[in-house]
Image: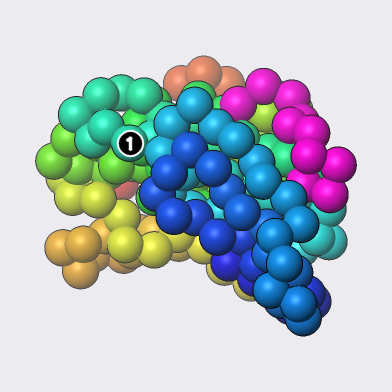
Amino acid sequence: TFSRDGAHLAVTPFSAEILIVETATGKVVRRLRHNDACRVARFSPDGRLLAVGVGGQLGLPVGSVHLWDWREGREIGRPLDAQGPVEHLEFSADGSLLVTGTLLEGRGSVRVWDVESGSPLTEPVVARVPASFVGFRPGADEVVACWQDGSVRAIDLPPRGAPQPGWRPELAEALAGG
């Protein structure tokens, strides 16, 4: 994936290392090492952070997202526990939120995270098939997830800064038929 200005490319070769390449010269300017296979990477809108989704084993509930200050080569905070291999990542336009699409055995899940705190903002939205796309709808407080069976789902984001009751995600799922 390219940085917003196109000056850098994060290469994810499904190995334990991400290469950051300067596009003008082709030179590798940074190597970010992980303990599992890197599947996907996304630069934040301001270019400061790189989110890296890892997880090599589809049958295991192991996978995470690592946030890096890639210019310094320093991981920021603790990894986000995605509970499965992370196949899709996308930052919100302001970079404050991150949506993940996770592969689970025979199914998939989508979840939204607060970047600063590393806390999940939504419960996992699980479907019978993996997600094929996740993204923030421009100008709206929702995430759109497309699934491999052709279904599309809008996921409302909770109000920012307001505590969310624990029963609210379950009620929303029940009402949505999930």
Q: Residue at x 54, y 43 (%)?
A: 17
Percent position (x, y) of residue 128? Answer: 16, 45
- Please tell me whether residue 61 is drawn above or below residue 150 in the rendered image: above
**Residue 13 occupies which quadrant of the picture?**
bottom left
- Please tell me whether residue 42 is drawn above or below residue 38 in the rendered image: below
Taking depth in this image into account, of 85 and 92 the one nearest to the observer is 85
Residue 123 in view of the camera: no
Q: Helix, strand or loop at disc 1?
A: loop
Total numbered circles: 1
Percent position (x, y) of residue 122? Answer: 52, 35
Percent position (x, y) of residue 129? Answer: 18, 50
Question: Mark 1 highlights which residue?
Answer: 56
- Please tell me whether residue 77 is drawn above or below residue 43 in the rendered image: above
How crowded pointer 1 is (Cα within 10 Å; few <14, some 14-19, many 20+) is rated as some
User: Is residue 41 found inside the magenta-colored segment of the image?
Assistant: no
Q: Residue at x 40, y 49 (%)?
A: 14
- Magenta region: 70-79
**Residue 4 occupies which quadrant of the picture?**
bottom right
Say what amino acid the circle numbered 1 marks: Gly
- What coloring was used for the rendering? rainbow
Percent position (x, y) of residue 72? Answer: 86, 42
Taking depth in this image into account, of 88 and 120 the one nearest to the observer is 88
